[in-house]
Amino acid sequence: MRKILMLAATTSVLFAGAEIAPIVDYEKEDVQKAVEVVKEVKPAPVPVPVVCPTPAPVVPAPKKWYVGLDGMGAQYNTDSGKCNGLGAVVAKLGYDFNRYFGIEGRAGYGINEQDHDAGGTTRIKENYGIYLKPMLPMGEKFHLFGLLGYAKAKVESKWDSSSANGALAGTVDESSPSFGLGLNYAINDRWSIVGEGVRLLHSVDHTFNVKGGTTREEDGINLDTYGLGVNYKF
C-alpha cells in the first residue's frame, strides 16, 4: 500500500510540472549590451585649429630731423658793380614737421675771394640764416621747397696797392629778409640730393671807403647763392 501511495505522488508531480525559468540567450544579450555601450560613448570633440592672425607690417615712423652740407657759388652785387665766382660752404640743420612744412637753420663760410667790378677784391666771410620751409611733393622721389626767413651775412671788400682809384673797401655786416627755392631728390629714406638758390642779403645799405680818399653810399646790395648739396635724415 505504501508503494502505491508513493507512485501516485510521483506521478502527480510529473503531470503537474514545475516552474522552469526560461532559457536565456546570453550571446544575444551581450551583443545588445555592447550596442548600448557604443551608443552611450560620445565621439571625441574635433579640435578647432588655432589660426594666428597675420601681424600687420611695421611701418617705420618717418624721419624728421636732418643735417646737410652744400657747396655754393655766389654773386655779390652793389650799385658800383658786381663780383662773380665767390664760393662758400653751408651747413644745415632742419626738422620736417610733415611732408609739407619744415624749419631749417644754416651757417656758411666763404672759401675764396674774387675781383669786384669797381676794383679791389671781395670775399664772403660768414653767413647765418633761419627759415620756414614750405614743401610741395612731386611724386615719391622729388619735392619742391621754398625758404622764407631772415639771414645775416658778412662780406669783406678791400683794395691793395695795385688797385685803381675808385676801388671799394669795407665790410658789409648786415641782416635782411632772405628767401630761396630748391628741389630735393630722395635717393632713399635717409639720403637726398638738393639743388637750390638763395638770396642771403636783399637791398641792404653800406658806406664804403673809396680809394682816392672819399666814401660812397651803396644802397642796393644783394648777395645771391646757388649750388648743390646733400641731406641726411635721422
Image (spheres, helix red, strand yellow):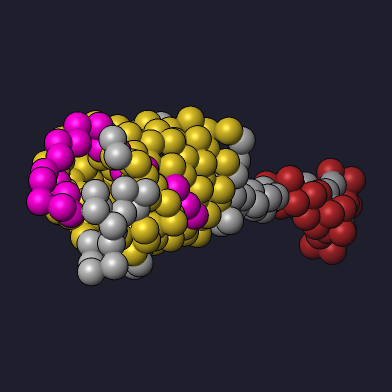
Quadrant of the snapshot with the C terminus:
bottom left
Quadrant of the snapshot with the N terminus:
bottom right
Please name the residue shown 35% across and 67% down the image: 112
* Residue 15 on image: x %, y %: 89, 46
Q: Is residue 10 visible?
A: no
Q: Is residue 139 above or below residue 12?
A: above
* Residue 95 on image: x %, y %: 30, 47
Please name the residue shown 30% across and 39% down the image: 80
Q: Nearer the viewer, residue 73 or 14?
A: 73
Q: Nearer the viewer, residue 29 or 41?
A: 41
- Name the chief secondary structure element in magenta: strand
Query: Is 213 covered by the magenta stretch?
Result: yes
* Residue 56 on image: x %, y %: 54, 47
Res 222 → quadrant = top left
Q: Nearer the viewer, residue 78 or 212?
A: 212
Please name the residue shown 84% across and 43% down the image: 16
Please name the residue shown 38% across and 36% down the image: 180
| Left or right for 59, reference 211 | right
Q: Which residues are magenta?
A: 208-228
| Left or right for 218, reference 21 | left
Q: Is residue 207 above or below residue 41?
A: above
Q: Is residue 220 above or below residue 15?
A: above
| Left or right for 37, reference 145 | right
* Residue 160 on image: x %, y %: 23, 67
Query: Is 53 covered by the magenta stretch?
Result: no
| Left or right for 82, reference 130 | right
Q: Nearer the viewer, residue 117 or 204?
A: 117
